[in-house]
Each structure stands twice: as C-alpha cells, then as structure tokens.
Amino acid sequence: MPAKTTKTAKSHSRTSHAGPGLYLHVPFCRAKCRYCAFSSQVFTMEAAAIYQRAVIAEIKLRRATHPDLRPATLYIGGGTPSMLPAWAMEPIVRELAKSFAFAPGMEFTVEANPDSLDLQTAGNLIRLGANRLSLGIQSLSDETLELLGRPHTAKQAVLAYAAARQAGFSNVSVDMIFGLPGQRLRLWLDSLRRVIRMRPEHLSCYGLTLEPATPLAAMADSGEIALPGEDEQAKMFLNGGELLEDSGYLQYEISSFCRMGYQSRHNLNYWEGGDYLGLGPSAVSTMSGARWENPGVLAAYAKAAQTGALGRESAPLSRQDAAREKLMLGLRMTRGLSIKDYNAATGADLLRRNAAVIQALRQHELIRIRNGHLRLSRAGMLVSNTIIERLMPTFDN
C-alpha cells in the first residue's frame, strides 16, 4: 500500500508539554454503552455525594504528598463528567485550585455527552474555568446510536454542540467512531463532512474496538450484527484522514486531528511520557517513574481516600515496560519517536538492533526515518500494533 505524506502541526518539532497533567475521573453514566469497557457506574445523588467527599479527601492527600505540583493541564474525563451536578463539581474544582498552583494559561478540558450538556451546564463549566470541551458525539445516525446504547440522538448532538458555543467555548473537540455495525465508507465520510461543517477545533476519530465481555462483542460473536471488513475499515481510516486534511485539519496522532494550534496538550503530555496525577476511582498516576492505580469500585475508592491508603502500592516501571511504553506512545504521534531520546532512555540502539526489521518496514513504506525520528506512514498506522511488536523483541533480555 503506498504511503501518503501526512501533514503535521509545526509545534511538534519540539517537546511541548510544560508540566505534569492532572486527571480527574468521574465514573457516572446514564447507562453503559454496549461497546464500553471503561470503569463507570449508574448515577445517583447518593453516589455523587460519596464521590465528592472522597475526591476532596484524595486531593488533600495528594497536596500533602505532592506540595510542589504545578499542573499544566487539567482533564476531567469519565464516565460522563457533564452528568455531575454543579453542587458536586464546584467544590471539587475549588479544592483543586486551592491545593495546586495551576500554571498560567492552563488547558482545562471537560468531557461531555450530548444528552447531559445544555446551555446552563456548559455555562457552569465555563464559570468553573473550563476552556476546552470534548463532546462524545460518536455517530450522527440515530439507528447506530441506538444500537451502540448511546443515550442521545443525532439532533441532541447538534444542539449540545450549539450550546457549548453559545456558552462561550472557543475550543471544542468532537469524538467520532468508525467501523461501526452496518457502516460503509460513504456513510462514514458523510458523517465526517457533517461534523466538519460544525467547525470544531479538534476531532478524535477512533476505530471501533470490540472489548471482551461487552454486549456489542457478544452481539458480533453471535452474528446478530456484522462489522465492516478490514479492507473497508482501512479505507475509512485512510480516506477519512485525507478528507480532514483537505478540510484544514492536521493529523498529529493516529486518531487525532486539529486546526493549527489546537492539539490536546493534556494528551500530548501522555504521549510524550510526561508525569500525570490521576484522581478518582480507577484513575492511574505516573510520577517520577512510579505508577499506581486507584480502586475502581466507588465504595473501595472512598474508603481508601478517607483512610489515606491511596497510592501506597506504587511501584517503579520496569525497564521492559518503560521501553514498550515509550515505543508505543512515541509511534502514535505523527512526528514519530525520537531515536536519540529512546536510545538514551532504554540503553538500546533501536536502529542497529532492529536493522533487518526496519529495512523491511521501510521497503514496504510502513515507516520512515526523518530528522532523527522513526515515524509511521499512514499505511503503517493501520498496522501499528504489529510494527511495535516486531520492534519489541529487542528488549526481551
């Protein structure tokens, strides 16, 4: 498959994260989508109150253990953060602002679903300091949304986007999924064109992944639904990327496109290997080479937060895990993996020890080496997991 040159955002010529990221997980959803394997639970007022008290307790704990933390980004994800009432959200954000010295111009993102975002909710988020909204539209087909178990319609998605703009959000990201049951290339491109006409600053386009033990996976296994074939999904990825670039969006990561200057700084920090502190049930943290994960069940998380037991089981990343992560995350970005930084971090010569594999990948136009970076072509992005696995045996011993 011929490789196509991919335009990239200019700011990727250098490392762009300026400080650690701060992530807050809100676990509540109206109902669990049929494809979702993330940690979430059905919203109740009682659960929201327990959650609020536990998160504030964790913030105070982290303030004591990380007194000099100066976050460059704050990302509130889920779950569905836009479901959390103002009486629960506002004290949490106030406690965060009181506990940590937010960097000037901090990017503050909140995820929202169309069924729980109206003008009042969007306005409340603006008043709390949010300056970026990530809207989970996923599809503009009512039939597909119902099949996925999404609790909103295409009309609600359009109205929620309009509410975000009216409230004052000047930086909006839209999430879309391709490779959906019954979807074909023409339908996917038509959906993308409709979103492009809305003019969001950022789009994330994800291929559907059937996670084990989800209802959608069971439906596929039983033959109740049929997914597009691999060739059709490849066309969706390639042609969708070309359509977005022709419409003024720059691809800077496998699934991420933006207008110039509107990259997700929070996600860039992840992909560039920066530190991040996670708060809330199931949140993961990586600080100074150590990693830990909070309990996923709200009751267990709340108990650990109230007793100060969170984060006690942190452990340093092994050399093997650190190498795998650096390779995987670096190759997700269109600017690629810095060979010099990778060799320094892992103690391995990536090019020398993988010479035959890299030569074969270059001959098939799946990778290229430019300006000291190993980069995937757009065709290579389709088989990124395979490429990473072929490079990983370097670190087995």
Image (spheres, rainbow, N blue to C red):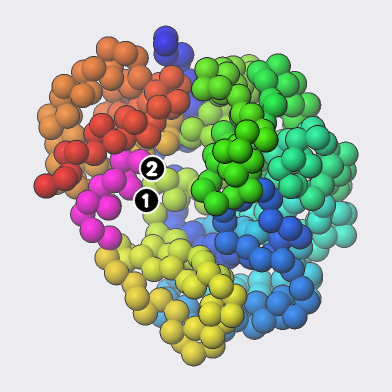
Q: Which residue is rendered at x = 43% and y = 68% of the image?
A: 293
- In the picture as drawn, the residue positioned furthest to the top comes out as 2
In front here: 228 or 385? 228
Closer to the eye: label 2 or 1: 2
Relative image position of residue 242 (x, y in whole percent): 58, 17
Left or right: 7, with 80 as reference point: left
Q: Is residue 262 left or right of residue 230?
A: right
Three-letter code for the amino acid on which mark 1 is drawn: Gly
Residue with the most extreme bottom position: 307
Residue 224, position as x, y percentages in the image: 67, 35
> Is residue 47 something that shows in the picture?
yes
Q: What is the distance, in whole Å, between disc 2 and disc 1 at their CAs?
A: 8 Å
Q: Which mark is residue 144?
A: none
In the image, is residue 397 part of the stretch drawn in magenta? no
Could you say which quadrant of the image residue 130 lies in?
Answer: bottom right
Count of marks, rendered view: 2
194 relative to 239 in the view: left or right? right
- Tag 2 and tag 1, C-beta contact below 8 Å: yes
Residue 321 in the image: above or below residue 161: below
Query: Residue 175 location, x and y as percent?
Result: 66, 40
Q: Is residue 319 magenta?
A: yes
For residue 330, above or below residue 318:
above
Say which mark, if any, is on residue 329: 2
What residue is at 63 percent from the left and 63 percent from the top? 40
Residue at (36, 65) in percent of width and height? 291
- Residue 169 seen: no
Q: Tell me which segment is drawn in magenta.
A: 317-329
* Location of residue 237 (image quadrant): top right
Q: Where residue 273 is drawn, which disc sits there?
A: 1
Of the two numbered discs 2 and 1 on the same chain, state the one appearing first in sequence. Answer: 1
Q: Amino acid at mark 2?
A: Leu
